[in-house]
Image (cartoon, grey):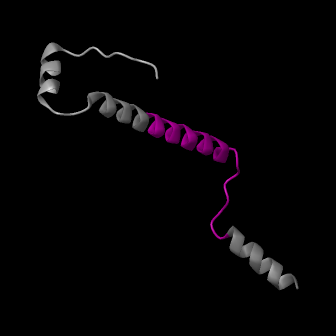
Amino acid sequence: MNVISVRVPKELKRMMKEIDINWSEEIRKFIEKRIREYRKLRALEEIDSMLSDIPEVKAGTAKSYVRDDRDSN
């Protein structure tokens, strides 16, 4: 594993010591969660970009294609 460090004010450090929490694990989980959220957002932006290149289809288009196909037989 790699090590990162974070600077916090003395008062915050004091308050952290008062609480029985594994801060390393909490911070690690928070970072992992933020990365997942960021990746999802990026994926949605890419999908949105891809979809913007597709011409808009009017509502009922598929229905009319099916009807045309049925009527042609």
28 w.r.t. 73: above or below: above
- Identify which residue is drawn at 11% across, 28% down: 18
| Image coordinates for residue 49, horizontal then vertical, percent | 62, 41
| Image coordinates for residue 67, horizontal then vertical, percent | 76, 80
The image quarter in which residue 24 lies: top left
45 w.r.t. 31: above or below: below
Looking at the image, the residue that sits furthest to the right is: 73
- Identify which residue is drawn at 27% across, 29% down: 23
Main SS of residues in magenta: helix
- Identify which residue is drawn at 18% across, 14% down: 9
Relative depth, front residue between 17 and 15: 17
Would residue 10 be found to the left or right of residue 55 on screen? left
In the image, is residue 50 part of the stretch drawn in magenta? yes
Q: Which residues are magenta?
A: 35-60
Q: Quadrant of the C terminus?
A: bottom right
Q: How many marks?
A: 0
51 w.r.t. 23: above or below: below
- Identify which residue is drawn at 76% across, 77% down: 66
